[in-house]
Image: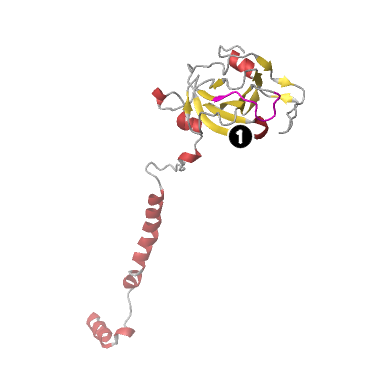
Amino acid sequence: MNHLRKLLRDALPASARPVSARRRRMPLRPLVILGIAVPALVGIAALPAHGIVTPLVKAEEVAPAQLNAGPATNGGNYMHDANAPWIRPVTAKVTSPYGPRRVICNTVGCSNTFHDGVDFGSACGTPIKAISPGRVTFSGNAGSFGERVIIDHGSGVESLYGHAQTGSQKVSVGDLVKAGTIIANVGATGVVTGCHLDLKIRISVYIDPGPFLAARGIAL
């Protein structure tokens, strides 16, 4: 009987011969294997070495305090450490303290009714010293504040020196200074009534320089 079936099957053209269930399933196997293997491979490729997704952070997106914090011995470059020295910018007495005051006007403009710094009554040409180590972030004309220098001391602390003599700045943006570095000379630029240095301390907002420096051993 089997021999007769074989003869009949061989007598039929190839297109009319029956295909076994086993052979019909064969072409599907590679597709099934691919359907399982490809997603697995893609998943493996998408995972980092330890299976944890870590976002990339560019250097410019990191706050400068994080990049430069600490003294040079700890890999920093200009940020303060606990032992950073503080000094007076000039030896003269304070002639206008922090707080409310009368409005001052001249050809440049008018001042505010609140003085957010302290004025030292130094003569024009007196050297102005940086009050602590830091990096210069501004050196130029600031309108009503006159010729000005700003120093970043790290940890969000800045010192600002206003009304300097025109062209007397001795530092440029990016310069690193020490406590006592001469940065400019006292002048009478901007909204002023005479020669003096206006010192401001800014920690996001302006604060009273008197208590700030007193806490660091400097009496104004």
Q: In which quarter of the image is residue 187?
A: top right
Q: Is residue 156 above or below residue 97?
A: below
Queried whether the magenta region covers residue 147, the answer comes back as no
Q: Residue furthest left?
A: 3
**Label 1: which secondary element:** strand
Magenta stretch bounds: 184-193
Q: Nearer the viewer, residue 174 or 84?
A: 174
In percent of width and height, residue 68 lies at 46, 30
What type is the residue that disc 1 sits on?
Asn
Q: Residue at x 36, y 61 (%)?
A: 34
Relative horizontal placement of residue 36, taking residue 175 as reference (left or right): left
Above or below residue 84? Residue 106 is: below
* Front residue of 172 and 69: 172
Answer few, some or many: residues within 10 Å of disc 1's Cα (few below 14, many 20 plus, some between 14 and 19). Answer: some
* 117 horizontally vs 5: left or right: right
Prevailing secondary structure class for the magenta stretch in the rendered image: loop
Q: How is the image coloured?
A: secondary structure
33 on left or right of 87: left
Q: Is residue 188 magenta?
A: yes
Residue to which mark 1 is pinned: 141
Work out which residue is located at the far right of the displayed protein and give it: 102
What is the quadrant of residue 110 in the picture? top right
| Near-viewer residue (40 or 104) | 104
Closer to the camera in the image, 132 or 123: 123
Residue 18: x and y, percent? 33, 80
Image position, residue 155 (x, y; %)? 53, 26
Residue 177 lies, with reference to residue 92, above or below; the image says below
Left/right of residue 68 with respect to residue 125 in the rendered view: left
**Could you tell me which quadrant the C terminus lies in?**
top right
